[in-house]
Image (cartoon, rainbow, N blue to C red):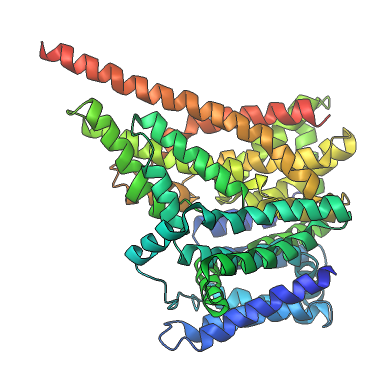
Amino acid sequence: MLEYVYQATGLLLIAFSVQTYFDKEHKKRLGTTLFWLLYGLSFMLGKVIPDWLTGLMVLGLTLIAASGFMGHGNYKYPETHIRKRHADTFKNKLFIPAILVPIVTILWAKLTGTSALIGLGISAILALVLALIITKGSPKQSLNDGRRLIDSIGWAAILSQFLAALGYLFGEAGVGDTVSQIVKAIVIDGNLLMYVLCYTCGMALFTIIMGNAFAAFAVITTGIAVPLLIVEQGGNPVIIGVIGMLSGYCGTLMTPMAANFNIVPAALLELKNKNQVIQMQFLPGLLMLAINTSLIYFLAF
Amino acid sequence: MIDYYPLIGIVLITIGFAIRLNTLLVILIAGVVTGLIAGLNPIEILSILGASFTKNRYMSLFILILPMIGVLEYFGLRERAETLISSMKKASVSKITLSYLLLRQVTNAMGLNLGGHPTMIRPLIAPMAEAAAEKEDPSLSEENRFRIRAFAALSENFGNFFSQLIFIGSGGLLLIKGVLTDAGYPIELSNMYVWAIPTLIFSIIIFIIFAKIEDRRLMNQKQANSEGEK
């Protein structure tokens, strides 16, 4: 069943690719076409073709992205005043399809007992149909607007899958063992609070260095949380994982490496001090980190 | 004796990000080098990369909801959110930023990425907060204007980050699920999002405290200024 959802995602990506190809004024037409095509094929054929071939496709995706061959196209997105007029017509009805997605997904998981991922796939289609009924929009235009959004995400769309692969390779090389040995060398008597602190502060610190909580999560969770908090201390993996990621977000508040969140806004708002947003966020971020640490300590064990 | 060699991947990532190479390229290089250290040959590394990519396809399922969100935006979803924001009683810096924070969190929980620094903070929230402060104190100093703008940016980041994992199909939850499943702990999305709620509630409390501090600071300075004039 889940495989069908992947096939649908693959088809959607290939549709984006075809649309890009026929977007004649697109400045980076071929690179963007090829990227979404390869990515769509990896979704559809992943289970069928040998893994090294998928690996080769991933290599191709990286090269296209790293060489800057991707860009934005033309999406026939209406002018602001037209969108304003539409907004006044539909009012809050516009939010209904969006609310449908989490509700149907959760209901599906609770009622059928199968994976919420299948529910996500089904609710996405239901919500799209409902959105088209409410707005009387055309399916073709919805594809065009989907493409507008995926192009604005760009190569970052594949980042999670990429990081998962990195986490796996790190595991093979024993990165987790090394990191947990270092933590153990620092925390001598196996103190639980110290372990939790090492995890949450490790998440924040790595996020500050890398500018990306997702990248930190793969490394620090396999390095500290799994061996020390889950295996050794018997902590709840769901609670540790979720609040661990949120600890990483505290790091995002404190780093110039997360430029889109902290440096770009300073420029947009014409602040004299480019670090003012970070300075503003530092203390609240630190408090949230302390709160997340306590939450893991008190809830997960 | 601790074996430090496996950490070279982390060093490479740090250097790569520092010199601003493309993120995917940095991760690829770090992964390949780490794999080589683990004694894998290039074909094996390519296979692991491909297998892991296929196994974790679910992490990117958010793609499926993009056409729906795209249609809604085409028909004015963002503009509707702007109307909701600007129709509220323009009272103070804290009320404006708090209303925005709450709207951001509610829509994020539905999987809608409605806010953003270029789309909401710069054109709408920062000017509204600044105008509210100016109404209170017409001689608002430049330094305070900058502070208010930076605080508006903070409300966007705070609202965005701490509500993301409430949405059951969010990329963050999917990544957490993937990493822990790989480590031997299969967990379900429908049990995960609830554990993001405590942090969300605390983030609202912390935000309110800092927003009130900003209000009070502006008030005190206004008083200090008017006393100085006497």
| Nearer to the camera, A49 or B34 | A49
Front position in the image: A167 or B88? B88
Residue for point 17% across, 28% down: B139
In screen coordinates, is A296 left or right of B137?
right
- Looking at the image, residue B186 lies above or below residue A25: above
Residue A182 relative to residue A82: left or right: right
**Residue A37, image quadrant:** bottom right
Percent across and percent down for residue A237 are 82, 41
Q: Position of residue B176 (x, y in %)?
A: 74, 50
Q: Is any atom of residue B7 visible in this view? A: no
| Residue B53 location, quadrant | bottom right
Picture coordinates of residue A228, whole percent (x, y): 83, 37
Q: Residue at 78% across / 52% down in the picture?
A: A107
Q: Is residue A87 left or right of residue B185?
A: left
Please give the name of the residue rendered at 30% of the width and 42% of the height, measured from the top-left corner: B127
Relative to B40, A280 lies left or right: left
Q: Residue A277 location in percent, x, y?
A: 40, 40
Q: Which quadrant, please, contains the N terminus of chain A?
A: bottom right
State how many labels appear.
Answer: 0
Question: Quick check: can you spot residue A180?
Answer: yes
Quarter of the image holding residue B96? top left
Q: Is residue B156 above or below residue B20?
A: above
Which quadrant holds the C terminus of chain A? top right
Closest to the observer, A163 or A191: A163
| Residue at image location 75% in from the left, 67% down from the top | B57
> Outermost residue toward the left?
B230
